[in-house]
Image (cartoon, rainbow, N blue to C red):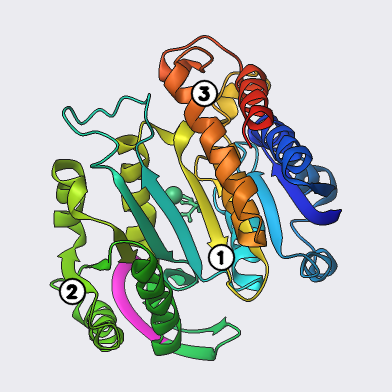
Amino acid sequence: MKTYRIPIIAGDGVGPEVIAEGKKVLEAAGDNYGFNIEWKEYPYGAEHYLTTGELIPEDALKELSDYDAIYLGSVGDARVPPGVLERGVLFALRFYFDQYINLRPIRLLEGVETPIRDKGPEDINYVVVRENSEDLYVGIGGRTKRGSVHHEAEVIRNLYNVKFGLDIDSDSDEIAYQVGLISAEGTQRVMQYAFDLAMRRKKHVSSVDKMNAMTDIYGFWREIFTKIAAGYPDVRIDFNLVDAMTMWLVKNPEWFDVVVAPNLFGDIITDLGAMVQGGLGLAPGGNINPKGTSMFEPIHGSAPKYKGLNKVNPIATIWAGAMLLESLGATQAARGVMLAIECNLRARKVRTFDLGGCSTTSEVGTDITRYVKQSY
Ligand code: IPM
Ligand code: MG
């Protein structure tokens, strides 16, 4: 029997609770579809950082590169200053493994109410391909008071290294700045992925940018999009400014199928998408390197106020588990998990508070596990 080895970083807050349900469902899928799963748990996150001062060490990253896919709960904790765990754990993983695609399906499943009246599962079914390694996320920025300073910074990626030397001469009391960067290689590869995905879906790709205000960076984005699109004459394309996009995604979600977006705008529109598909409890994501180690997670955070209450919806994490199985090539099992989620939702019985129910996290996980075992 085939064995998949899957490392887990359950992380902080509700992470361990939702990951527990994901494990349960994926193990049932293994029983049903003929494979074993060997889990390996890693402790990284707030608790580990607060007791040892360590975020995620280089040797752990090296060890993790032996695997194809990582299952991640969530990181974030009020006892740690904002940004420390995000940069030290989440971005460390995304950037180390060069998971340059953040794939986020926005799909209204049957049995879920969308706050957008009159839109149903046939209207809300698109995928956001979010660039996941560049843009304003490269981590170059600083603050400086009146006077002159020199700031050196660099962006080190598999594809390229970029060094910046900034001479700042300012008579403002204090300034803060953040530098965004997109590269030709980084933009081409994410667009390539989006167009390939579109060929397997409805042959339609929508680009998101803010080219009217930030001409250099997003003008470049559009130029590359246009070049890649030329290689896919059967694919319909359109350009959307991100502000207008937030409007269309609420008013006319049925217009979209594959949406490709730079990192920051992709982050923003997928929280919007999560609401449209019924809430953060139902929104999964994949951090994907098609040729390396990918990582699958619910897009919600660690939700510290619900920690330990067995209360939050595990479906986002279970759905992320289905995406993980799909990435390992266990296509049937992935489909089985999705069907089980859909059975649970359609039955409208065992559901957590966010969907108007009163079941616990583990009851929902158990119910979905039961459906996985029934389907063939
Ligand atoms: C996400 C999150 C992260 C991001 C945060 C936690 C830094 O919002 O995965 O969407 O902005 O990428
Ligand atoms: Mg986000």
Residue 182 horizontal/vertical position (percent): 39, 80
Badge number at residue 288: 1
| Residue lying at 34% horizontally and 83% vertically, measured from the top left | 169
Q: Is residue 42 visible?
A: no
Which residue is nearer to you in this view: 247 or 172?
Answer: 247
Dot 2 alpha-carbon crowd within 10 angstroms: few under 14, some 14 to 19, many 20 or more: some
Q: Is residue 322 visible?
A: yes
Magenta-colored stretch includes residue 190 = no
Kind of residue indicated by mark 1: Ile
Q: Which residues are magenta?
A: 167-177
Kind of residue indicated by mark 3: Asn
Label 2 or label 3, whichever lies nearer to me, is 3
| Residue lying at 66% horizontally and 72% vertically, measured from the top left | 96
- Whichever of labels 1 and 2 marks the residue nearer the N terminus, that label is 2
| Prevailing SS of the magenta stretch | strand
Q: Which residue is mark 2?
A: 211
Q: Which residue is mark 3?
A: 344
Q: What is the CA distance from the residue labelled 1 to the residue labelled 2?
A: 26 Å
